[in-house]
Image (spheres, rainbow, N blue to C red):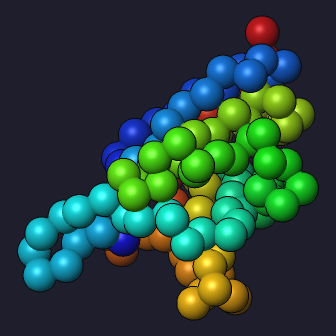
């Protein structure tokens, strides 16, 4: 699986959203990841020193992570500005949980397991 190769920007204190599109490559063909069976998503935010700086869990922050609008199209809508994350640059690892993956499954981009997020103060 792979996350779209984008940098996402969030403003602290605002509920701006960014949509992440996740694809899955099988036999050389890329198709959208299906989040229909997903029960939970966790985002692990790593700082520039690769230290885990924050964790956002859809079970405890349901407004921050939403995949309900287009689950079969691989879309995850993030509203991280409402989470009070310290301003900075982060690499984010997305872990999705489902009945067939109760311990979680890391969504990767090629051989890199993260996508980039910038959180800004205004």
Q: Nearer the viewer, residue 72 or 117?
A: 72
Q: Residue at x 83, y 30 (%)?
A: 82
Q: Position of residue 60 (x, y in %)?
A: 89, 56
Q: Position of residue 59 (x, y in %)?
A: 84, 61
Q: Nearer the viewer, residue 50 or 23?
A: 23
Q: Residue at x 58, y 49 (%)?
A: 68
Q: Residue at x 30, y 69 (%)?
A: 24
Q: Is residue 104 above or below residue 68?
A: below
Q: Nearer the viewer, residue 99 or 77?
A: 99
Q: Position of residue 63 (x, y in %)?
A: 78, 40
Q: Is residue 65 above or below residue 83?
A: below
Horizontal arrangement in the rendering, residue 29 relative to residue 43 (left or right): left
Q: How many marks?
A: 0
- The quarter in which the N terminus is drawn is bottom left
Q: Is residue 22 visible?
A: no
Horizontal arrangement in the rendering, residue 5 relative to residue 62 (left or right): left
Q: Nearer the viewer, residue 39 or 78?
A: 39
Q: Position of residue 106 (x, y in %)?
A: 55, 75
**Which of the 4 image quarters holds residue 38?**
bottom right
Q: Is residue 64 visible?
A: yes
Horizontal arrangement in the rendering, residue 13 relative to residue 9 (left or right): right
Q: Residue furthest left?
A: 28
- The quarter in which the C terminus is drawn is top right
Horizontal arrangement in the rendering, residue 80 relative to residue 96 (left or right): right
Q: Residue at x 84, y 49 (%)?
A: 61
């Amino acid at each position: 699986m792979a996350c779209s190769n984008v940098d996402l920007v969030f403003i602290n204190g605002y509920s701006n959203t960014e949509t992440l599109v996740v694809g899955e490559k099988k036999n050389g063909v890329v198709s959208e990841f299906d989040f229909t069976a997903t029960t939970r998503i966790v985002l692990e935010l790593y700082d520039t020193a690769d230290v885990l700086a924050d964790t956002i869990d859809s079970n405890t922050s349901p407004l921050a992570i939403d995949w309900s609008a287009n689950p079969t199209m691989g879309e995850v809508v993030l509203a991280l500005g409402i989470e009070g994350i310290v301003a900075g640059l982060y690499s984010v690892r997305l872990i999705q949980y489902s009945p067939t993956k109760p311990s979680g499954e890391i969504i990767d981009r090629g051989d890199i397991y993260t996508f980039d997020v910038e959180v800004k103060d205004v």
